[in-house]
């Protein structure tokens, strides 16, 4: 178990590590930057750079079967961000391993698991091959209008909580269809090359959530560091959380 400073979760669990860029939201990937440090420190999980001929960052997609045992050892119920250092639905992660991860989550109902993906089409195509217990929350990243189709894919998944991570928010995202969405997280980018986020963009999404009665969580304004500019919006914090739903897989 790795404790985290991410405001909407408690711990991270990485049975998969490594990824590659798939959209503009990945341009300043924090996980890629962190993997470079972890590789230099000798962390075993981050030695694979995906190319034996180079000595690049340890960010080649790698499954870690031994990590599947970790949730069974946690003594108290926790809120778990699954694969903060990867994307479980990356094409290089075998279906059988994704199923193994879901089996562990189903077998440890005392914990609540939050999964986030940018590969929403593969998620949708695999949904009927996975079990969806009530303690699994499924989300997609929506950083700009170009990727709004990810929400449509997510809507077809029978997760007890379907959520959007609108982070890093790099453009206005007006008029989102929030039907069937249970939670929206918004955050600005952080790091040396962070892109600015306008207040009006955040306020618009907050108002969309209020209008649709969808819980809204504002994570950060972003900046040089995640905490640089705080997380107050209109003078208050927004820490709303979702309520799990009972859902069935839709017919193809």
Image (cartoon, helix red, strand yellow):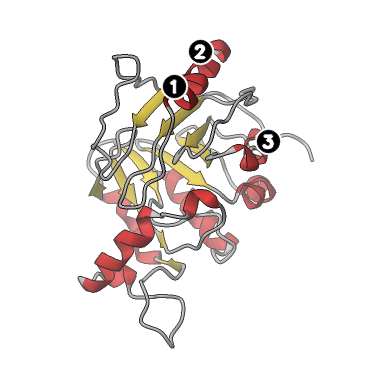
Coordinates of residue 40 in the picture (x, y in percent): 23, 73
Q: Are marks 3 and 2 in contact (CB under 8 Å)?
A: no
Residue found at the very far right of the displayed protein: 252
Residue at 38%, 26% (x, y): give it.
218
Residue at 62%, 37% (x, y): give it.
145
State the separation of the CA atoms marked 3 and 2: 20 Å
Q: Name the residue tied to disc 1.
A: 216
Coordinates of residue 251 in the picture (x, y in percent): 78, 36
Mark yes or no: residue 54 visible. Answer: yes
Q: Is residue 217 above or below residue 32?
A: above
Classify residue 119 as left or right of residue 88.
Answer: right
Coordinates of residue 187 in the picture (x, y in percent): 40, 34
Label disc, if present, on residue 152 of the rendered structure: 3
Mark 3 or mark 1, earlier in chain: 3
Mark 2 Cα within 10 Å, few/some/many (few <14, many 20+)?
few
State the separation of the CA atoms marked 2 and 1: 8 Å
Mark 3 Cα within 10 Å, few/some/many (few <14, many 20+)?
some
Looking at the rendering, which quadrant does residue 79 occupy? top left
Q: Name the residue tied to disc 2.
A: 210
Mark yes or no: residue 68 visible. Answer: no
């Amino acid at each position: 178990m790795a404790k985290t400073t991410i405001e909407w979760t408690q711990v991270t669990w990485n049975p998969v590590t490594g990824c590659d860029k798939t959209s503009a939201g990945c341009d300043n990937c924090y996980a890629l930057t962190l993997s470079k440090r972890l590789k230099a420190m000798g962390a075993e999980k981050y030695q694979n750079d995906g190319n034996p001929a180079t000595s690049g960052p340890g960010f080649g997609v790698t499954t870690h079967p031994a990590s599947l045992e970790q949730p069974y050892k946690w003594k108290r119920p926790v809120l778990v961000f699954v694969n903060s250092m990867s994307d479980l639905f990356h094409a290089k992660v075998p279906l059988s391993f994704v199923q193994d991860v879901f089996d562990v989550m189903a077998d440890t109902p005392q914990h609540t698991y939050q999964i986030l993906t940018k590969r929403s089409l593969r998620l949708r195509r695999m949904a009927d091959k996975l079990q969806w217990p009530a303690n699994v929350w499924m989300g997609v990243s929506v950083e700009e209008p170009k990727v709004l189709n990810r929400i449509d894919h997510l809507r077809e998944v029978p997760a007890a909580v379907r959520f959007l991570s609108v982070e890093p928010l790099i453009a206005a995202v007006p008029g989102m269809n929030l039907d069937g969405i249970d939670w929206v997280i918004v955050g600005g980018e952080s790091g040396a090359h962070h892109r600015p986020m306008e207040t009006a963009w955040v306020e618009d999404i907050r108002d969309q959530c209020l209008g649709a009665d969808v819980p809204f969580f504002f994570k950060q304004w972003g900046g040089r560091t995640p905490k640089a500019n705080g997380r107050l919006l209109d003078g208050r914090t927004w820490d709303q959380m979702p309520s799990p739903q009972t859902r069935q897989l839709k017919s193809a």
